[in-house]
Amino acid sequence: MALIHCPTCSCQNDSTHKACAQCGQSLAGVGKAPIRSLSGKLRVLGVVIIAVGIIGTVLGTWWGPPGLLPGVAFYMMANFLEPSA
């Protein structure tokens, strides 16, 4: 059996007790991790970051190599699009 601390008086109690033995405070829910949810601003920020990442990936796939290395793109175009004599 685990010991839990009373949130009011910090007395140690057995985890099977429903109330603190010293002050009578209810021990329901003590010792359990609270459930947290993201606030509105963080949720919006997460959606914006994911959207920018997806858009950046798509645009980078389409225009990335020629935009980053235009000399290589022109070299490849010159070699592959040469008129045949």
Image: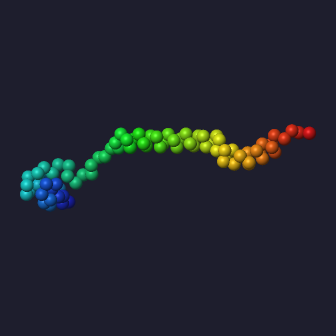
Counting from the top left corner in percent of width and height, residue 40 is at 35, 39
- Give the left or right position of residue 42, taking residue 23 as reference: right
Tell me the residue at 31%/46% (across/down).
36
Q: Is residue 68 left or right of residue 1?
A: right
- Quarter holding residue 1: bottom left
Residue at position x 42%, y 42% from top? 45
Q: Nearer the viewer, residue 51 or 32?
A: 51
Q: What colour scheme does the image use?
A: rainbow
Can you see residue 84? yes
Give the left or right position of residue 6, taking residue 77 as reference.
left
In-front residue for pair 1/27 = 27
Residue 9 pos. (x, y %) = 12, 57
Task: Give the position of the C terminus as an image quadrant.
Answer: top right
Residue 61, x across and y down, in percent: 62, 42
> In which quarter of the view is residue 5 placed?
bottom left
Q: Position of residue 44 (x, y in %)?
A: 41, 39
